[in-house]
Amino acid sequence: MPEMTAPKTIELRVLRYCPSRDSAPAFGSFQVPYTDDMSVLQALQQIKATLDGSLAFRWSCRMAVCGSCGMMINGEPRLACNTFLRDLAPDAVTIEPLQNFPIERDLVVTVGDFVKKIESIYPYVMPKAPKTIEQGTYLQTPAEMEAYASFADCINCMLCYAACPQFGANPDFIGPGAMALLQRYSSDSRDGGQQARLDRIRGEDGVWSCTAVGICSEVCPKQVDPANAVNQNKSKSALDFFLSRLRKETVS
Amino acid sequence: MSESRPYLRAQPRHWWAHSPYRAYTIRELSGVALALYAAILLAGLASLARGPAAFETYRQFLASPLSLLIHLLLLAAAVWHMWTWFQILPKTMPKLVWRGRLIRQDVMSLTATVVAVVCSLLLLSLFILVGAYL
Amino acid sequence: MSTPNDSPLPKRTIAPLFWLLFGAGGMLAALFGPALILATGVMIPFGWGLPQRFDSYANVLALARNPLGKLVLLAVIALLFWHAAERLFLTLKDMRAAPVWLLRWLTYGVAAVLTVVTLALLLAIGF
């Protein structure tokens, strides 16, 4: 008969905030029994199921494709479903909502502004040479797809925004995630909307808030490389800065 | 119960001094060290304009142990600038596809760094050649 | 879904100009900086590998009087100042050291002044 050993437990320190009750966020502590295969998300679900049903957090797929469970784990922006207790034990795990975003409640942050930023950069192919259905499909070589493939992998988890200190300093900065989506379309061989998108990011809150810190690409769980999306658009925006003056002169 | 009062935590004032941002701050400051070198060149230009006596004072400063120390520190800063410059460089370029595959950023960085080292060596060689024959 | 056409286009910023100057200075420093510092600060003053006569008054004057020499000196000095100005501006802004308008004058303003001073000195040295 196998020996019954006491289950090992780990302490989770979770930042709590309930607007109707609290004036400011404060840490709560939970002792959670765990096994080596458990993720931080499973630990949170365990807390909610057995210790404190009021704990609020977003989650969905449990497998790092939906982007819902982004949060600060031991001070780093991570997906909770993709972070494992065995790598953090035996020390206490500190869990906070994503940095740089307003906290709605517990680990849930406000995402409305992020959604507006995505909407603002024409997140769809605007065909260079539109085809009717009768004319057939748009063709694209594998090499042409490589040019935007990584940017298409973005799952909108916002870890890059949590990592970006310029977004922390300026919440109106369009940010790495929206720029990754912009570049996914602008470098698509079918697309002709490059100028329209450049016009949206030419301001102080567009690309020009970025100082090439680069941590956004380091925390990205999908290797999207948003730093590349932002910084290659600095060159394009700078070129546009001068070309637009020439365009105005030829028009007038 | 469904009151919404979002709470924004303030950005820590010294975020730039802590991990993981400290490396970025040091990188940026290496660029500022280059201004010190430019200032030394400008000082040389100013003393040149003032005449032989002033320029001799400048020469003597350049031949001092203090100047040597400063220049060695500036050299270290310049090398750090060069290395980190080419680490960032691929981020400013569009995705490059060669024979169906993406050119890797670390390959771009290493190639550019090697080219830069060669450029510096070529410049030094040029000076040495000029020194030998003129 | 709010359509982007509803909102006015963002105001252009002059930041690209300073970014290009930063880029030019940075590339110059990356390619030739170590060689220049080594040559002018270590090798020539002590005669290690390069002759000390390189920084004799007569030789440096000849370099500074040469039109091409003037161009090179102006480019190196000015671009390094503009590169440092952009980086210092952004770093001081990160540190919230002062109001942004003041930081612009202290960095870009000083770089502009130093560029003019360099040009003036090069012209004063004559041809």
Image (cartoon, coloured by chain):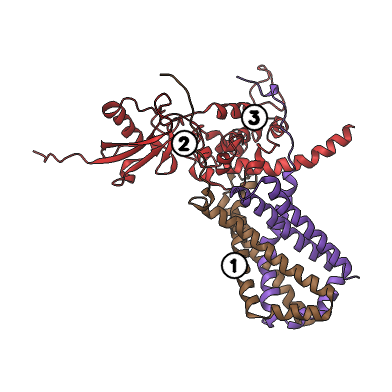
Residue visible at 66% across and 34% down in the picture: A186
Q: In the image, residue A206 lies at what x, y percent? A: 66, 37
Task: Name the amino acid type tagged 2.
Answer: Leu
Horizontally, is A64 left or right of B35 in the view?
A: left
Q: Secondary structure at mark 2?
A: loop
Q: Are marks 3 and 1 on the same chain?
A: no
Task: Point out the tag, 3 or 2, that comes first from the N-terminus.
Answer: 2
Who's the residue at 62% across and 51% down the image? C92
Label 1, secondary structure: give it.
Answer: helix
- Counting from the top left corner in percent of width and height, residue A43 is at 31, 34
Specify the chain shown as brown: B
Instruction: Label the purple chain with its letter.
Output: C
Residue extending farthest front: A23
Q: A125 or A24, which is in the foreground? A: A24
Number of marks present in the image shown? 3
In the rendered image, the quadrant that contains the N terminus of chain A is: top left
Colour of chain A, in one word, is red
Image side of residue A10 versus residue C59, left or right: left
The residue that mark 2 highlights is: A98
**Given this view, does label 3 or label 1 mark the residue nearer the observer?**
1
